[in-house]
Image (tube, helix red, strand yellow):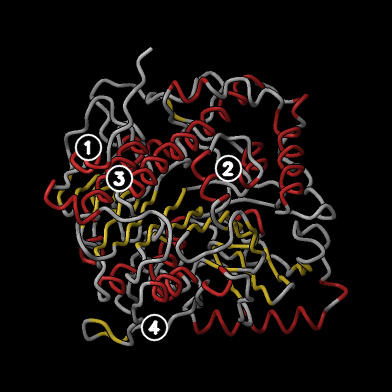
Amino acid sequence: MTTARHPSRRDFLKSVGVSALAFSGLMRTAYGDAPDRPPNIVLIMADDMGFSDIGCYGGEVCTPTLDRLAAGGLRFTQFYNTARCCPTRASLLTGLYPHQAGMGHMVYDRGQPGYTGRLNNSCVTIAEVLRGAGYRTMAAGKWHVCRFNYQTNTARDRDVWPLQRGFDRFYGSISGGGSYFYPHGLFRDNTPITDIPKDYYFTDAISDEATRFVGQAAQEDRPFFLYVAYTAPHWPLHARATDIKRYEQEYTVGWDVLRQRRLARQVAEGIMRPEWTLTPRDERVRPWNEADHRDWHAHNMAVYAAQIDRMDQGIGRIVAALEHAGELDNTLLVFLSDNGGCAEVLQEWWAKERRAFMYGAVPKGTEIRFGNDPTITTGGPESFASYGVGWANASNTPFRLYKHWVHEGGIATPLIVHWPARIAARGELRHQPGHIIDIMATCAEVGGAKYPATHKGQSITPLEGISLVPAFRDAPLRRKALYWEHEGNRAVRMGKWKLVAKGPKGKWELFDLEADRTETHDLAAEHPQRVKTMAESWQRWAERAHVLPSPWKE
């Protein structure tokens, strides 16, 4: 039997465009004393992935790369995003609450400073800050922090594209999600890509480009920052057939059993406490043994799992690139999701309104069957569907609600941090509450960069986030409160207490998250003064952070 030869580092570097002359400068020890040079920083974000989907957070999806990174680093159990794609990306990139950066909602201008639909000039990106400290900066994947015309499939706001906001290189989509096989709005740097190969799959392309960026950056004697923003596993349910096949029998047990199994694993891992109650099944969802079209539902979840599996495979290639370049040990690698699992059910009218966005560069004559219709088999490029409420409920185990809302199901994200040179802990959990606004402060600290008061003659909004570095050594993160608003959904967390409301007219609910992380016991009636104090704090934040005036009807 012939054994496949493992490629040498020289072979690998040659394959990603690194010259042989530069190779000798890349031979660094993977382990041992941490180098004096600041670390490389790699931020990887999934799109619409629930809290419990990946293996190391209780899921059954095969994610060996992410599991390996968690085993060699840290998992945060109480880390938060902003409940939606555009706002989360704005906060991640700027260290501000999304409204302060102009992205309080989506990429539409609603006529208010907090809702301009594009990053404003009062913020700076991580790339701009780290570039000032000598970093090479690169991005691959989904940008989605400037306006986009979905009817004509054209991007606007060129001054807010990646290369205009601090990145040296970019490959991906300026707009949001869409077909994985026929994507729309693709760019390399500032140049549109019109020629899509026949066997194209967006997740693979993002991974390939990110891997290439690592190889090219590793030949320079300076640190690099790489932002990898996957669209997986955001709808549509598009996956490689070989990946889907591995999961075809996995989900025939149904969403009820899946939720119970995931929670049991979370408790066993210490991510959840045994006393935290599993939230009731969504009232719109029937018990699995009473559900119609169970085979179709099970297949849909198999496609969703395959999307995550493929993303993990790609992250594996990025990690391998770092290893081959001798850079993994001194790379701060962070993985998270932009919001909770998505319960959106695709409707036929969406297809008519946004055909260019939905279908991208579909060849003429190709028929796309749109919507969550049991007569449509999902997975291939001719389908366009989501996995539905029942599976979103399972993705967010054990929490309430979904993307859009600011109950825990909408804003809780896995957060994996891996940095062997500086984090001594291996496989440990961190329970300190953190927020995506903290990523900027963390990157600036570890990169030796200074967050500016002004940039290009413009005053810059002071940082809202704090560095996560103390939590790396399990020290507390000291702050008074965290805040949220999206589409009128509101929340504030102070210590163990969380005040949250569903919709602009929703009543405030109060939860003790130490005793009840799953938000099943509303204590508002028992603590009226605490509700009043926290609501007033939220109001003051909303007034200063451009949340108000709000476009949502009171």
Q: Secondary structure at mark 4?
A: loop
Specify the amino acid type for callout 4: Thr
| Location of residue 333 by image quarter | bottom left
Q: Secondary structure at mark 1?
A: helix
Specify the amino acid type for callout 2: Ile
Q: Which residue lies under the disc numbered 2?
A: 54
Specify the amino acid type for callout 3: Thr
Q: Which residue lies under the disc numbered 3?
A: 211
Query: Tag 4 or tag 1, which sits nearer the N-term?
Result: 1
Query: Tag 1 or tag 2, which sits nearer the N-term?
Result: 1
Q: Are marks 3 and 1 in contact (CB under 8 Å)?
A: no
In three-dimensional space, the C-alpha distance between marks 2 and 1, rounded to whole angstroms, equals 32 Å
Q: Secondary structure at mark 3?
A: helix
Query: Tag 1 or tag 3, which sits nearer the N-term?
Result: 1
The N terminus appears in which quarter of the rendering?
top left
Query: Tag 3 or tag 4, which sits nearer the N-term?
Result: 3
Q: Which residue lies under the disc numbered 4?
A: 461
Specify the amino acid type for callout 1: Asp
